[in-house]
Image: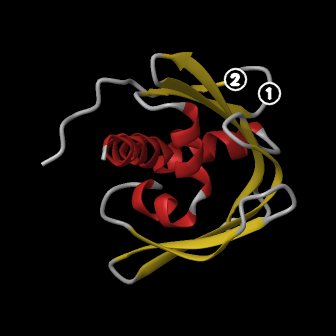
């Protein structure tokens, strides 16, 4: 049995640009949170909602690298891919993100890790898409469930 997280995830849509901002704190140092985002074996243990199986086709998390993975449930498969444009250890990741079900909707994502001291980290992620309609579809697609459950799973992984 898992214990509920004591941290709240904030998801906001920017009113002036088609951007979603996600802010979450973790009870782990930035190096550990960064590794959980860059090591494919760890990524498969927390990314996405509970109940989905994740398999990585490739995951080369370095500046100039790329990734492709699938999340599956009840015979349905959801493929995702992107490129890593900038990877700075324990500080920042800039990447593209594409759900292959909507291949023309590419998001530019920036993950910033902030050391809060006492072994705690704030993660701020922004996802910029090409239109307000695309952003709103992204938000109502169930993203909130996947983000919240994924971060709960990440809490469990970081505590282990």
Determine if residue 38 is in view: yes
Judge by depth and name the residue closer to the eye, 58 or 147. 58
**In the rendered view, would you say 14 is above or below 32?**
above
> In percent of the image, x 77 and y 66: which residue is there?
66
Q: Residues within 10 Å of mark 2 (few under 14, many from 20)?
A: some
Q: Which residue is mark 1?
A: 17
Q: Quadrant of residue 57?
A: bottom right
Q: Position of residue 21 (x, y in %)?
A: 63, 29
Q: Residues within 10 Å of mark 1 (few under 14, many from 20)?
A: few
**In the rendered view, would you say 53 is above or below 152?**
below
Name, please, the residue furthest toward the top. 117
> In percent of the image, x 34 and y 41: which residue is there?
152
Task: Report the colour scheme.
Answer: secondary structure
Give yes or no for contact between labels 1 and 2 (Cβ–Cβ under 8 Å).
yes
What element does badge 2 sit on?
A: loop
Q: Position of residue 144 (x, y in %)?
A: 45, 41
What element does badge 1 sit on?
A: loop
> In percent of the image, x 32 and y 40: which residue is there?
159
Q: Position of residue 125 (x, y in %)?
A: 64, 34
Q: Position of residue 26 (x, y in %)?
A: 44, 29
Name, please, the residue furthest toward the bottom. 75
On screen, residue 97 versus residue 73, left or right, reads right
Determine if residue 10 is in view: no
In three-dimensional space, the C-alpha distance between marks 1 and 2, rounded to whole angstroms, equals 6 Å
Number of marks: 2
Q: Quadrant of residue 53?
A: bottom left
Name, please, the residue furthest toward the left. 1
Q: Which mark is residue 118?
A: none
Q: Which mark is residue 14?
A: 2
């Amino acid at each position: 049995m898992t214990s509920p997280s004591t941290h709240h995830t904030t998801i906001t849509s920017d009113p002036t640009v088609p951007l979603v901002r996600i802010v979450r704190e973790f009870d782990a140092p930035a190096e550990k949170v960064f590794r959980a985002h860059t090591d494919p074996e760890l990524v498969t243990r927390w990314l996405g909602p509970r109940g989905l199986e994740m398999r990585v086709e490739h995951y080369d998390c370095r500046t100039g690298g790329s990734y492709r993975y699938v999340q599956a449930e009840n015979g349905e498969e959801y493929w995702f891919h992107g490129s890593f444009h900038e990877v700075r250890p324990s500080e920042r990741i800039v990447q593209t993100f594409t759900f292959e079900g909507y291949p023309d909707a590419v998001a530019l994502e920036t993950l910033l890790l902030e050391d809060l001291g006492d072994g705690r980290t704030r993660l701020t992620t922004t996802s910029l898409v090409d239109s307000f309609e695309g952003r709103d579809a992204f938000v109502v697609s169930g993203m909130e469930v996947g983000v919240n459950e994924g971060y709960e799973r990440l809490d469990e992984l970081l505590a282990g």
